Amino acid sequence: MTLQELIEFRDRMYRDPELLAIYEQGDANSHWQTRHDYQHGDEVTALARELTGHIHRIFPELLDEVTREFVIPCAAWLHDIGRAIDIDRHDIEGARLVNRYLKKHGIPQDLVQRISRIVVHHRSGSVIKRGIKSPEHAIVVIADKCIGDENRVREDKAFMLNILKHIGIGKFSLARRNFWYNAPHDRVNYAIKEANLLVDVNEADKAGPPSGEVVLKLRVDERVAPIEEIVTLDWFADSFFACGKASKYFGFSFRLEFNGVRHMWDKTARKGHGGWVPMRTMHVPRGCESHEEGCDENRS
C-alpha cells in the first residue's frame, strides 16, 4: 500500500462504525472510571501527533513518514480498544483486535505487528517492567499518560465535585473527601483544569546529542485534590514513572509542573521511597562562574 492509501485508511478508521461500536462497549464496561470512549482516542492521537512533530524536528532522521503518519496515529487511536472485551487485559485483547482488524483491511504485516506491539505494551506496568520498545512506542506512552483533566470525569461525578469544592475552605473542602468508589481518580482528574505538554530542548548544547526535558504543565484546583495526592496516587505515580522512561529513550528528563512550579523526581524523598519535589533554583552571583574558586552557590 502507498503512503496515501495508508493515510486514507487511517482517516476512515477513525470513524468506522465497527470500531466506534467497540469503543462504545469499552466505555460502557469502564463506566465507573473516567471516560475511555473514542473521544479519548481522539485526544491521545492529537497529542501523539503534536509530540511526533516536536521529536521529528529535534531528531529528523529518527521517524520516517509512514511511522509519523500511520503507525503512531493508528496505535494512539486504537490503544484502549480492548476494553470492550476485558478491562484488566485490555492491552492483550486490544492487540488481538487490532491485529485482526488491520489484517482484514489488507494492512502490510510489518505495520500490523508494529502497531499491535505498541498497543500490547502501552500500559504503565508494561513500560516499568519491560521498558520502551521503539521511539513510536515512547511517543504513544507519553501521549496516553499525559491525557487527564476534568473533561474525562463523568458528568454526574463532575457535577457533584463542582458543588462540593465550594463547601468548606481550602484543604477542608468537601471535594477532597472520597464519597464513592474510584473517587480519588475522579477527584484528581477533575482537579486538573488545564494540561499542556512541551519539549524543552537545550539549543546551546552542540557538543553532543540534544538534551532537555519533556514537561507536563498542570493547572490544579487544590480545593479538589492536593498536589501531594496527584503525585502519590498509584495510578498517576506509575503513569508519570512510565513517562520518565519514555522521555529517557530520547535522552530527555521528564518533569511535572504544578501551578507554575516545576518538580523533579528525587529518589531520596519520602524516606527513601522517592517522590516528586519542587526543583530548587540556583542563584549565581553576577560576573562569577559557579565553578571558579571563591564563588559561592546560593540555593533557595
Image (cartoon, helix red, strand yellow):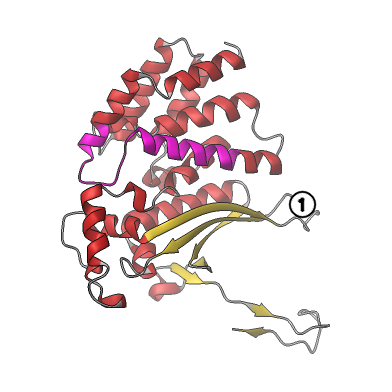
**Quarter where residue 188 is shown:** bottom left
| Quadrant housing the C terminus | bottom right
Residue 108 screen position, x and y as percent: 51, 13
Q: Residue at x 56, y 50 (%)?
A: 247
Position of 72 with respect to 204 (left or right) is left
Residue 268 in percent (x, y) is at 46, 72
Look at 80% across and 79% down and name the residue there.
289
Residue 39 lies in the magenta-colored region: yes
Whether residue 134 appears in this view of the structure is no
Whether the magenta-drawn stretch holds residue 175 is answered as: no
Q: Which residue is farthest bottom?
A: 294
Q: Return the x and y of residue 61 as percentages of the image width and height.
A: 71, 34
The residue most toward the right is 287
The residue positioned farthest toward the left in the image shown: 180
Residue at left 50%, top 38%?
46
Task: Tell me if residue 140 comes above or below residue 222 in the rendering.
Answer: above
Q: Amino acid at mark 1?
A: Gly
| Residue that numbered label 1 is attached to | 208
Span of residues in magenta: 26-52
Q: Secondary structure at mark 1?
A: loop
Seen in the image, is 278 located left or right of residue 40? Answer: right
Count neighbours of disc 1 (C-alpha within 10 A) and say few if under 14, some if 14 to 19, many if 20 or more. Answer: few
Q: Nearer the viewer, residue 221 or 90?
A: 221
Quadrant of the drawing holding the N terminus: top right
Residue 272: image location, x then y, percent = 41, 72
